[in-house]
Amino acid sequence: MSSVSEPQVAAESSPAEVVPAIEVHDLTVAYWTQPVLWDVDLTLPEGKLIAIVGPNGAGKSTLLRSILGLVQPITGWVEIFGKPYEKRRSWVGYVPQRESVDWDFPTSALDVVTMGLYGSLGWLRRPGKKERATALSCLDKVGIAHLAGRQISQLSGGQQQRVFLARALAQDARLYLMDEPFAGVDATTERAILALLQELRATGRTVVAVHHDLQTVAEYFDHVVLLNMRLVADGPIATTFTDENLQRTYGGRLTVLSQAAESLLRAESGAPKLDV
Amino acid sequence: MSPSLTIILVGSCVAAACALVGTFLVLRQMALLGDAISHAVLPGIVIAFLMTGERAPLPMVLGAGALGVLTVFLVEAFHRTRRLKEDASIGVVFPALFSLGVVLITKYAGQVDLDLDCVLYGEIAYAPLDLLFFQEQSIGPKALWVNGAVLLANLLFVSLLYKELKLTTFDTGLAAALGFSPIVLHYVLMSMVSVTVVGAFESVGAILVVAMLVVPPATAYLLTDRLLVMLAGAVGCGVLSSVFGYWLAYWLDASIAGAMATVSGILFAIAFVASPRYGLLARLVRQRQLGRDMAEQLLLLHLQSGGTPQSVEQLAQRFSWRRQRLEAVIARVGNRGWVQRTNGSVAITPLGERAVEERGVAPLRHQEATA
């Protein structure tokens, strides 16, 4: 994978005043009458790899979708680099869950990546040679330029995930929001995605990813948000990704057996041990 | 213009206009919504007629457009309560609206120059007789003008908003995040469907509209992997259906709209069976090929790891294959020089050993795809 270009950072705020990448204030979201997120206050720093972790139905995807303005909150607001999302669209790249789209759609890998550039094109303008060249270079960055013309249903799960990442790269954003980028991919792709995230961080980008695999949180990310409808804890891995916080996040759902397995695995990877 | 040419042209305009919007309905898995709209616009037409007292195209299009949007809105409103699935929701809304239209027509039958048969089955055969006048001068068949205008509008709509339609259809989430409002586009698309339907309603009837909205796009979907080609293919299938449909109707002396819809069905059946990639035959051939590959590799692997030579009886027992199949597999790998057969026993050759190493075993090769 070749390097990712530097982001165009607008000098809007004075260096003394650090604007967070994301600020979530008093956010409550409900689907129908079922609350999904309850009074979440969250400030996420720029330039970090941040994992959102929590049990199924904890509102992880909803948090991501609220940040993107895809979900209407009951109360609260979200700001991206100090402004509402509508003013920051071009700063934000989005990688949805792989299952959220129909991969039988009649289109090629290159075409899907080109969609990442639609935002900068705006209404009515068509993508041209320049956009296709950019898209191809993004496919190259994720190592599948040779599959550019392939119908998307003919790609493996890992390759499809790479297409989505290439599309996000094409957006050339300062902040990337990813919904389970590591879900259901093969080991090679997992390593490739990790390398890509680290490269994004090296060029000053922020990545916020919903992540399911507790074993790799400490290894892959700098910062963690523990969520279970309410915000349980957030902060750097070392101080936040503790047994106590995990226990509070997963409650009874982290059974004694899975705790034992967890603590074994984490002991191997050098993370703090879980008391069973 | 000869009557036959007029009929074929009207049919082609309807088919092409329907195919353009129908392609997006099919890809959005909303083909049934197209069906629903094509019936639910009826009260809109009747109300527009009662208000203006004439069959002027513009009020009718507006009335139908409004009802089309109302249909979509109601279906989603019911669906959103979570007590009705989308299909049930469609099933509730469109008969209700359609029957309201039927009641209105029969109640005002005296004043309404609309006839139920005509609305349902249409009579494309009369298209050449119903002329449009401009300053007392005939300027050609009305159906051709109306449906030609609709086709032009749809062409403009799809070509201008191609990128936006593609994105919102494929990935609603990203479309919304990038600021292309998927909801607005959804309603615009459905309004275009309504307008298309009402334009075609009078001239060809609801049944042909339902067929043309879904069948040609579904046919084209079987033939291509590219959206643009699918759009063109759907239009092509639609036009072919009307040309050959007219010819079929003439030959059988049967309903023209019915024959056109039938031909579209036949084209679909042909594509379903014979499409090079997604057709039934292609799939059977591929499946057979995969099965053969697998059998060959299993045999080679077994011979390699299980020690050779082995008797044919042993192999037949090991794989529980019929003798005939086993012989065929042995013959095929034998032809490539991968096994050597002497009398009743089979041994793997050095060439065969290399083949196993190079090609791997099918399940292993496909591991990444299923991971």
Image (cartoon, coloured by chain):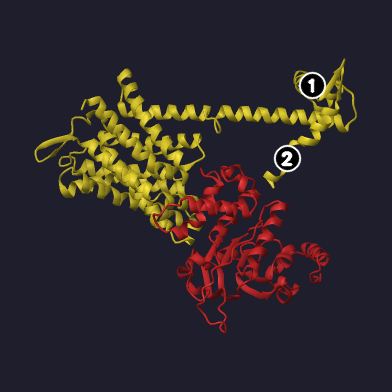
Q: Which mark is residue A252?
A: none
Horizontal and vertical percent position of residue B320: 80, 26
Q: Which residue is mark 2?
A: B365
Residue occupying the far left of the picture: B136
Regarding mark 2 in the picture, which secondary structure is present there? helix
Q: Label 2 sits on what residue type? A: Arg
Visible residue check, residue B81: no
Q: Which residue is mark 1?
A: B334
- Visual hue assigned to chain A: red
Is residue B107 toward the left or the right of residue B334 in the image? left
Is residue B310 toward the left or the right of residue B359 in the image? right
Horizontal and vertical percent position of residue B8: 29, 29
Q: Label 1 sits on what residue type? A: Gly
Is residue A42 toward the left or the right of residue A267 in the image? left
In terms of depth relative to the viewer, which is nearer, A249 or B292?
Answer: B292
Query: For mark 1, does the 10 Å Cα neighbourhood hold few (<14), some (14 to 19), or many (20 or more) residues?
Result: some
Is residue A164 toward the left or the right of residue A267 in the image? left
Residue B148 figure quarter = top left
Horizontal and vertical percent position of residue B333: 77, 24
Inter-mark Cα distance, 1 to 2: 23 Å
Q: First in sequence, mark 1 or 2: give its number.
A: 1
In terms of depth relative to the viewer, which is nearer, A29 or A3?
Answer: A3
Regarding mark 1 in the picture, which secondary structure is present there? helix
Screen quadrant of the N terminus of chain B? top left
Horizontal and vertical percent position of residue B161: 39, 51
